[in-house]
């Protein structure tokens, strides 16, 4: 039996190849948006664009996985691993962490001792970086208790920046206030690109970039400025990028990072999960980074 197995949720936006390589169990997060079901499109973002063209005014609703969803994943992993480490999307914006804890409480007393749960206090590629950190620690041979302590120190170090074309999706979901959404719109009208991020598990305004010709350029300059000191010290930086069906944009951002910034690796690029997608909208790009 392998020593430690991972349970993650869909909100981490991990690529399929990483999930399969490390034998992760992925717990689905739920989305309800009947108006999109019969619209054409290969992914949720394409369907959202079509909905806007047709004047559909509804918004998608999301909900956390049920305890039963986590229970199924825990039991599956407990068959193959001695202990389980579960990392969830931020508890400040979702009940996913709570569902995972409820599921652990349903297990036998003996199995409960084999399951450890960590709140990433992040989402999308920011959450994904915590998953990759856990993999690093597992491969270093650390035991589960050590890994949990390391992750609790690591979680506050992950930085996430996101730029969206329209804050209406986040506003409609209640993830950001109308005050923040209106500030976002005012900055856009003035020619700025507002940047939102995650701080202590919550979505916050973290800055603006003036005269950046597009979202990839604005994110690159934000990332470049915030990591300059660390890179000059020779510190290695790990980056992950997710997007709302804007592959050319993320490829441009990835190339800018790899071409211009030393000591930096792009760990993965992936489409934002459907559930988070209905919150950020088409063409959003999210970049998360951490020091290795």
Image: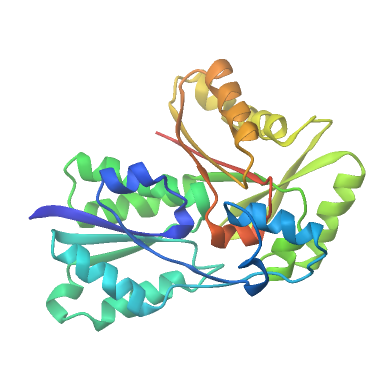
Q: How is the image coloured?
A: rainbow
Q: Give percent across and percent down for residue 72.
A: 27, 73
* Along the line of sight, the residue nearer the viewer: 171 or 43: 43
Quadrant in which residue 47 is drawn: bottom right
Residue under the point 18% across and 54% down: 4
The residue closer to the viewer here, 9 or 224, is 9
How far across and down, in percent of the image, does residue 254 sit?
56, 28
For the C terminus, give its image quadrant: top left
- The percent coordinates of residue 277 (x first, y second) are 60, 57
Residue 87 drawn above or below residue 72: above
| Residue lying at 27% horizontally and 43% vertically, measured from the top left | 21
Q: Quarter of the image for the N terminus: give it.
A: bottom left
Q: Nearer the viewer, residue 10 or 39?
A: 39
Taking 236 as reference, is 92 above or below it? below
**Which residue occupies the foreground of this view, 209 or 163?**
163
Q: In terms of image quadrants, where is residue 223?
A: top right
User: At 15% from the left edge and 80% from the top edge, which residue is drawn?
Assistant: 109
Q: Tell me which residue sits at (16%, 43%) in the image.
A: 141
């Amino acid at each position: 039996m392998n020593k430690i197995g991972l349970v993650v949720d869909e909100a981490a936006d991990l690529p399929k190849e990483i999930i399969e390589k490390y034998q992760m169990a992925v717990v689905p997060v739920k989305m309800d948006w009947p108006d999109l079901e019969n619209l054409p499109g290969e992914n949720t973002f394409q369907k959202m664009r079509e909905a806007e063209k047709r004047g559909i005014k509804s918004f998608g609703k999301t909900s956390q996985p049920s305890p039963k969803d986590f229970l199924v994943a825990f039991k599956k992993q407990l068959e193959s691993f001695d202990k389980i480490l579960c990392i969830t999307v931020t508890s400040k914006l979702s009940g996913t962490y709570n569902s995972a804890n409820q599921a652990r409480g349903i297990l036998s007393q003996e199995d409960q001792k084999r399951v450890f749960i960590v709140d990433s206090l992040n989402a999308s590629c920011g959450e994904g970086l915590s998953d990759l950190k856990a993999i690093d620690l597992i491969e270093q041979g650390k035991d589960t208790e050590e890994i949990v302590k390391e992750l609790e120190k690591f979680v506050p170090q992950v930085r996430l920046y996101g730029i969206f074309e329209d804050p209406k999706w986040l506003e409609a979901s209640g993830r950001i206030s109308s005050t923040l959404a209106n500030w976002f719109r005012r900055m856009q009208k003035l020619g700025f690109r507002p940047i939102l991020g995650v701080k202590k598990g919550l979505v916050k305004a973290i800055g603006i970039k003036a005269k950046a010709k597009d979202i990839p350029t604005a994110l690159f300059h934000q990332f470049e400025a915030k990591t300059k000191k660390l890179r000059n010290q020779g510190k290695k930086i790990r980056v992950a990028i997710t997007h709302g069906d804007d592959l050319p944009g993320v490829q441009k951002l990835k190339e800018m990072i790899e071409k211009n910034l030393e000591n930096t690796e792009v760990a993965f690029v992936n489409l934002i999960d459907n559930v988070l997608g209905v919150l950020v909208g088409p063409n959003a790009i999210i970049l998360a980074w951490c020091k290795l």
